[in-house]
Image (cartoon, helix red, strand yellow):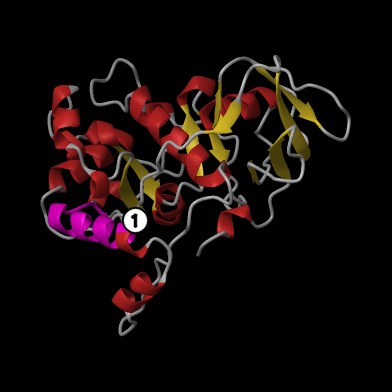
Amino acid sequence: MAGRRAVGRDVHFYLSSEPDKPLGGMRLNPSVTEENFLSMLDILIVASGPYRVTLRSSGGDLMSTDDALKPGHYDIRPCSRRDTIAVTEEPCITRILSRTITGRDDIFRARVRERDGKCVITGTVNVKAYRDDWTGFETAHIFPVSVSNEEYFVQNGFDTGINSCQNGLLMQSHIHQIFDAFDFSVNPDDGYKITCFDEDPFGIDGRILDRICRDPNDKKSVPDELLRWHFRQAVLTNMRGAGEPSFEMDFPPGSDMMGEILSGPEAAKRMEAELFSRLNGVSFG
């Protein structure tokens, strides 16, 4: 659905010279601090020099503090009149929900399950793991196979490429779905804090990514660079302009999946992602 991400925003940001034209915004959750918001703007804003961010209702400048961000309208103004400010045109990926197509990534799934044993987002342990029952748990790719770049992974030491367990996290099924949708992400530069960019019905905003998947002494642990990539994509997807389109994922038997995709937003990009995913095989465990 196009524009879904802009509905219900209670934080909006603007160029100070165009106070009626929002550049973007976000739905505010309790974990977001002033420092967090400024770091998100650093991802979104391209500026030729330093700039200030002011809460319009109070006129006060934001500072890099742990104070909770307040809802409202924020104006961005360059510190010098000679400097320019614009929103980045960095592209976002088109991501779809990971589903098993072949047995190609069985090793990936097994290694992630063995390492984590629990949902690393909620902390829920799979108490049925001893009998190899993983119902309700799925292995999620951080960097999706729908835009696979095997050469990148091999060159950076991931022995099995895109299906290295270092590119995977174990999650409960419903958490996996919203992870793939970029509705939340993990910021490795803020103590591995989880930030929700959507409403938070599952109570994960502000939690910390479980240490079991990021132990620096474990060569199978998830590298910060992949988490950082996912967080950056989540900021771009949710906060720039009206946000990126979200896609229908619920196709009951007999429904016209192809027709719905072709009539939906970003149809060509989604079809490309769906095709690539099916050709490469992904994990849905």
> Which residue, given by chain and number where applicable, does mark 1 sit on?
96
Q: Residue 123: percent from the left, percent from the top?
A: 47, 40
Instruction: Please report the bounds of the magenta region as a residue range.
Output: 269-285
Please name the residue shown 34% across and 72% down the image: 262
Q: Is residue 187 or residue 234 the one in the foreground?
A: 234
Q: Is residue 39 or residue 201 the one in the foreground?
A: 39
Please name the residue shown 40% across and 43% down the image: 92
Please name the residue shown 13% across and 34% down the image: 160
Farthest residue in the right direction?
58
Residue 45 part of the magenta segment = no
Q: Which secondary structure lies at badge 1? A: loop
Q: Residue 120: percent from the left, percent from the top?
A: 42, 38
Residue 52 falls left or right of residue 246? right
State whether residue 90 is above or below residue 211. below
Q: Residue 13: percent from the left, percent from the top?
A: 69, 38
Q: Within the image, what quadrant is residue 83 found in?
A: top right
Q: Residue 185: percent from the left, percent from the top?
A: 48, 38
At label 1, counting other C-alpha atoms closer than 10 Å, the crowd grade (few under 14, some 14-19, many 20 or more) is many
Q: Look at the magenta stretch and give its main secondary structure.
A: helix
Residue 274 falls left or right of residue 266? left
Q: Does any portion of residue 69 appear in the rendered image?
A: no
Q: Amino acid at mark 1?
A: Ile
Q: Does any portion of residue 180 appear in the rendered image?
A: yes
